[in-house]
Image (spheres, grey):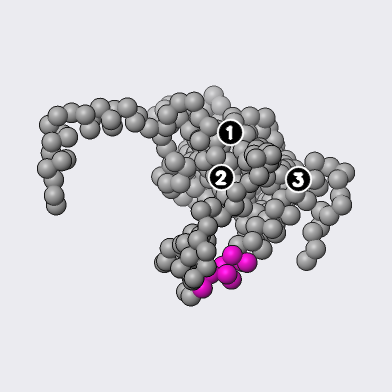
Amino acid sequence: MSNPFSNDTTTTGARAGNAAYNNLSTEAKEETDAIAEVPGLIGGGVITKIADTASGSGGTKVLEDFVPPPSAAIPNYQNIQQTKFNDIKTTTVAIDDHLERTYVDVINAKKAQIVTLSGQLYSAATASYPAANQRLITTTGAASGDSAHAAVNPTGISTFIYPSGCDPDPSTCTTNVDCCLIGVSGPVYPDILAAAHYPNLSNGTQTSGTIPAAQVDQTFVRVSRSTTGSGNYASNTLGIGQTLYASNDANYRGAESVVTSQTSLGTYYFFDDASNVNAGLASSITSIMGEITTLRNTLQSKISSNVNELREQKHQEELNTWFMDAGFRTTPVKDYASGVTALEDNELSTVIKNYDG
């Protein structure tokens, strides 16, 4: 397939997409060509320097593979690498922005509608003392049978006492008049895009002494145009991280704590049969929940196709940039001085010198 961004310079995304596409294509070809030139089996061996190979085959051994003329300017490799990262990051930013606006925002607007409808049902049921067939369920376990269960944070589902002003004392209250009832409700949080990322990589910091590669150092962060970060993501967190996830109440994909740290959209009330309170409102909730499920499935399908493959390429360029920047740091990543001091210790240095294992 030809470059879909070729000759399109109308937007930042198009220019970045063109550059990223060309970079990836060039690197893929160079890698393929390089592998094709290696004799024998690939992997497991050490490829000798070109100069040594030439000498070993009877040719003239050269001292350097390439000696630039004195007038040649040294390329700004750091700037070149930063530009490569910026270009491919912009492509992931564009995709994240599209996914959030097209799917996540729409889903959350519908979840807000469900909260409103549920509140209307609760208000209607408790306008007077709730009739027996218009009450909430009494156990949290029964909440899973509700049509909107997948719009509610399951960890937060709990019981509460209602209606307001009821008599909590069974010995003094009048049944079906003012006795307190047990109901079940749960918080509704927004669906989010979440990403697994390495904080020191995203922040662009090399002073912590942690190389951004260990799985244990990965954390989840919300991916959003309205969430600010730091480093390359100071303005927002679009494009951040190595792997993108659609995190929601049906499947948090490891990011539940990030979801529940967001501002709640409101409370959902679990009725035994909401249609006995208002059949129209109950039907609307079921219908809207179906729309949310469809949007979630479509979003997940988009992410599962090629989105994370491109994000992995962005992650590799970000790592390359991070390691290159680490070479220009002004503070040490490791405490090398202490290591030198340890080697200067008479006892330790003697032990080391005497070791012949």
Whether tag 3 and tag 2 are in contact, CB under 8 A, the answer is: no
Amino acid type at mark 2: Asn
Q: Where is residue 145? Give x, y as percent.
A: 55, 54
Q: Nearer the viewer, mark 3 or mark 2?
A: 2
Mark 3 crowdedness (10 Å alpha carbons): few <14, some 14-19, many ≥20 = many
> Going from the N terminus, do you reach mark 3 or mark 2 first?
3
Residue highlighted by disc 2: 320
Is residue 352 shown left or right of residue 58?
left
Q: CA distance from mark 2 to mark 1?
A: 33 Å
Is residue 325 shown left or right of residue 228?
left
Residue highlighted by disc 1: 262
| Residue at image point 54% right, 24% down | 165
- Front residue of 339 and 141: 339
Q: CA distance from mark 1 to mark 3?
A: 32 Å
Mark 2 crowdedness (10 Å alpha carbons): few <14, some 14-19, many ≥20 = some
Residue highlighted by disc 3: 16
> Going from the N terminus, do you reach mark 1 or mark 3 first?
3
Q: Where is residue 202? Give x, y as percent.
A: 56, 37
Magenta stretch: dominant SS? helix
Q: CA distance from mark 3 to mark 2?
A: 18 Å
Magenta stretch, residue numbers? 32-39
Amino acid type at mark 3: Ala
Q: Residue furthest bottom?
A: 40
Is residue 301 shown left or right of residue 243?
right
Q: Is residue 309 visible?
A: yes
Q: Where is residue 91? Give x, y as percent.
A: 72, 47
